[in-house]
Amino acid sequence: MNISNIQRIMKKGRILRNEPMSKHTSFRVGGPAAYYFIPADEREAAGLIRYLYQNGLPYYVIGNGTDLLVSDSGYDGAIIDLGRHDGTSFTMLGIDEEHKDGILLDCGAGCLLSAVGNIALKLGATGFEPLYGIPGCVGGACIMNAGAFGAEIGDLITSVKAISREGELKRLERSELEFGYRYSSLSRDGYLVARVELILQKGEASEIKQRMDEISAKRREKQPLEYPSAGSTFKRPEGDFAGRLIEDAGLRGLRIGGAMVSEKHCGFIINYDHATASDIYALIETVRERVQAKSGVLLEPEVKLLGNF
């Protein structure tokens, strides 16, 4: 990779080498990424994507690093980080309270879902409460149609500003995004999400706060939030729940190295005690094998794998 060419594209952004991915994933594991790019705005991101794609160089886009397991040997490619960095266009949020359909939030891909929820509360805008506690960024949530408590972010999206592999900025309407369970056509078509427009409705701030508090309490009660994890490790199998199948297979509390099936919620694999990525991967595969042997259901990981396993 010619860093001089990258520097001509990214004049304001940051370029890092051999950046430990354990600093950037919610599992808190993972070896170094050969190249780590933090573009300052959409123009830099588009130019970077175009250069990498045209030169056949591997890359992966992250926001908050959730739903991602990077191998202990790292990733011999480029990470493009759009999340949580002040001063980039990807953390900026615009508000239109006079929109014809409700209250419009124009969110950069790097806006944390928790931050969007807090802004919605201040505006007295309802509809986002179930998504408030999901530990991720808007862009990634859009690509995978993240959801919780019966709601999905795709239900709120009106349009997306995306960057194609060729570096072209496009506005895509909701009808073009093919939202499904933990799916959108954005992932299939290789788009990078730059901005997302959400429509919320006017509500009562006190009721919104009460609902957010209730959902937060349920999360604390039922989910192992005190340990590093990637949230729900497996997608929900049709007509059932991954956590129930794992528990019925007798796997609650199963450990491999420092990784463990959570005793609080069997659908979570947690970094219990200085786990390695290899520990976590081995436990994921063991759970899949034993659940299939017990119930005949092959669980599909919700966690993405990056690097060599």
Image (cartoon, rainbow, N blue to C red):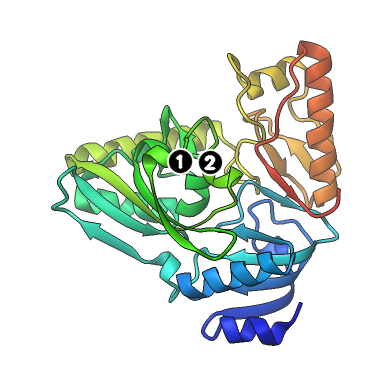
Structural distance between the alpha carbons of marks 2 and 1? 5 Å
Q: Nearer the viewer, residue 121 or 296?
A: 296
| Earlier-in-chain disc, 2 versus 1 | 1
Residue found 34% across the figure and 40% down from its top: 156
Marks 2 and 1: CB-CB under 8 Å? Answer: yes
> Within 10 angstroms of label 2, few (less than 14), some, or many (20 or more) residues?
some
Q: Nearer the viewer, residue 41 or 69?
A: 41
Q: Which residue is mark 1?
A: 177
Q: Is residue 148 at all visible to an observer of this figure?
A: yes
Please tell me whether residue 294 is drawn above or below residue 55 in the rendered image: above
Q: Which residue is mark 2?
A: 185
Residue found 85% across the figure and 39% down from its top: 282
Please tell me whether residue 306 is drawn above or below residue 47 in the rendered image: above
Q: Is residue 153 at all visible to an observer of this figure?
A: no
Q: Nearer the viewer, residue 54 or 76?
A: 54
Residue 59 percent coordinates (x, y): 69, 62
Residue 244 percent coordinates (x, y): 65, 18
Q: Nearer the viewer, residue 166 or 178?
A: 166
Q: Amino acid at mark 2?
A: Ser
Picture quadrant where residue 53 is located? bottom right
Picture quadrant where residue 187 is located? top right
Residue found 38% across the figure and 41% down from its top: 174
Residue 99 percent coordinates (x, y): 17, 50
Q: Secondary structure at mark 2?
A: helix
Q: Amino acid at mark 1?
A: Leu
Task: Report the side of 179 relative to 50 (left or right).
Answer: left
